Amino acid sequence: MTSYAWLIPVLPAIAFPIIVFITRKVRFLSALVAIAAIAASFVMAVGVLQEVFLLGITMEHPVEYAVPWLQIPGLLKIEAGILIDPLTAVMLLVVTLVALLVEIYSVGYMHGDPGFSSFFSYLSLFSASMLGLVLANNYFMIFFFWELVGLCSYLLIGFYYHKPEAARAGLKAFVTNRVADFGFMLGFFFLFAMFGTFNFRELAEAIPGYQNTAFLALAAALVFIGPIGKSAQFPLHVWLPDAMEGPTPVSALIHAATMVAAGVYLLARAFVLFASLPDVMLLVAYVGGFTALFSATIAVAQRDIKRILAYSTMSQLGYMVMAMGVGSMTAGMFHLMTHAFFKALLFLGAGSVIHALEEQDIFRMGGLYKDMKVTTTTFVIAALALAGLPPLAGFWSKDEILAATFDHGFTGLYILGTLVAFLTAFYMFRLIFVAFFGKRRAGLHGHESPLTMTVPLLILAVLSVVSGFVGTPFTEHGFSTFVYYGEPHHVEPNYAVMLISVLVALAGIGLAWLFYGRPSDVPERIANRYRSLYNLLVNKYYIDEIYLWLFRRVVLGLSEAFNWHDRHVVDGIFDGVGDMTRISGRKLRLLQTGNLQTYALVIFTAVVIIALWMAAPVFGGVVQ
Amino acid sequence: MITLNHYLALGGLLFCIGLFGALAKKNAVAVLMGIELMLNAVNINLVAFNHFLEPARVTGQVFAIFVIVVAAAEVAVGLALVLNIYRRRLESNVDDLDWMKW
């Protein structure tokens, strides 16, 4: 099976042109082609995972298939190849499963949309790019698919391109990611300059013994800029909330399995590079921790259901990056997996609500549980998983991150992580109490979504419950002995950490209930009391405004200066050269009369002079 | 007694007259005639040198005949050019033939 694993990204990639060129007009067929392709990929991903178990493929002994793609002997060698280890197998499964469910869901959600077929073609291409990225065996290929993922996110976020905000959001996502991609590209070019290869396995062998750590740290920091952009870490996070302009299934896919997971996956794939550099690891850990807290605080004050979830995603990604930074790849990847399921569920649930109400402001919803039983139940399960209540999936993975942070001696980050867990529980249940319970508001009546939408919700709800069990501290041969860096290690249960995280989650839910679970003016009063802080949070710490100001003042100002320099100095020099040539030409041209006789006279005079010259005795001439 | 120097002086004189004609005359036909004179001055030189220095061989005379042949061809081409220019521009004054100047 592993030798056919290259088909996993190829199938959805083929679905893309089939939909675009053949089935575009027939909506039903377009959806069928896309779903069939990703379903086949899913089956193969299951097969790959099974074979990884059966053949005993481990992190130390991966399977690699590669063909040379571009070769200049002695100078450059780029392979097209796939690398299969437990990390890849897990990611393949998560990506194909979430993509499959999202595509099934989209049949109901996008029903009646004029762009139905192209939506499915983009989804296929998006999944294909992500699967290619997961399978890639070298930096060059991963970068190629990385860019494809960026392109697809642009297409999908800006899917409602007739809406100016959506078009701008697509552009913003693309440009922000380009900035990050440039750093990533420089980083792996530096690696190539140092080691002469893009291949992960060859690099993993060469890096640990490398002496020039300053240069290596520079390369690692540059590579890390890639995940900062793709996984929406501070300060390149600004595109993610705006990405909510896309259709909701896309948000689910971006936030759960494809786009933002790519950054964390790259950190895991390049872990050997980071692991040898404690300073860079520290940077990674603190960027992650800061982002987690930063975005959790913003989420507390948002009103748009999708934006709350978007900031929640950023916060959870911060957790994952922090886990990588403190040195626990296992915890990061474990949380990536469980988060993929419950965050996809949350977004699809939100999509179900938006589909029914055509409304995104939670304070205009209310009492939805009466009309939307399945959506409400599954949404609450996902929120509980996200808040980290046992025995749901989020509890085990979040606990593993917190335990890893604590065990590695990052007490500050541990406290920060616990605080984020509290905030997470609070803002999620604020959303639930306001939108799903309480009284109906503003005459908005929900209705349950069709089966194509509720079935994926139910499947994801089951996964949100059970997917954590593969990695609990009580599981023998669990996730930590499967996906790991260095030595496989079994994490001992840390009951104190568990207890505290459960308590803060319950405290968060309780506080949300106090504030929003019943009629109360406490939130209002607090908002009024701390008006400036509240405004700061509502306006997302004014980061967008700061960027805008920076752009207007600094970038445009600099551009203005460069423009002047270009027009007056550079153009001046070259225009001067041109003018000089033209003017001297105009003068010199007067020498030419066009009169043959003049030319003949000149020639004859010259011949006479030359003859006299040669004949003169001083020059050894014939005249003595 | 006529010596080599007399012939050379005649050739030089003829060449100078030809050169003056070629450079100073306005009429294109007169210019061509000047060129003919220069060629013939050279011919006189060639024949004179042959006669006085190497009377046993006829190298110089053969050269002179070559020059006459080439001159005939040149006059044919030159006159054809002058005739064509005259037809197009009704002009054979070389001062006005300054198309080479851009």
Image (spheres, rainbow, N blue to C red):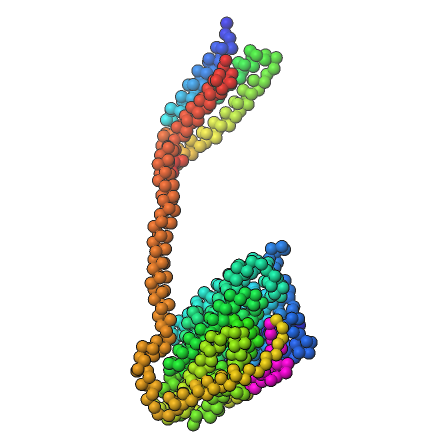
Residue A469 inside the magenta-drawn segment: yes
x, y percent for residue A294: 42, 75
x, y percent for residue A338: 54, 81
Residue A285 visible in the displayed image: yes
Q: Is residue A429 above or below residue A81?
A: below
The residue located at (61%, 71%) in the rendering is A486
Residue furthest right in the image: A55
Viewer-closest of A591 and A421 = A421
Residue A306 visible in the displayed image: no
* Corner quadrant of residue A95: bottom right
The residue located at (62%, 76%) in the rendering is A489
x, y percent for residue A521: 32, 89
Residue A618 placement, left or right of A575 = right
Residue A593 inside the magenta-drawn segment: no
Residue furthest top in the image: B1
Q: Which quadrant of the figure contains the N terminus of chain A?
A: bottom right
Viewer-closest of A472 and A178 = A472
The residue located at (61%, 81%) in the rendering is A478
Residue furthest bottom in the image: A370
Where are the magenta residues, as a range?
A: A465-485
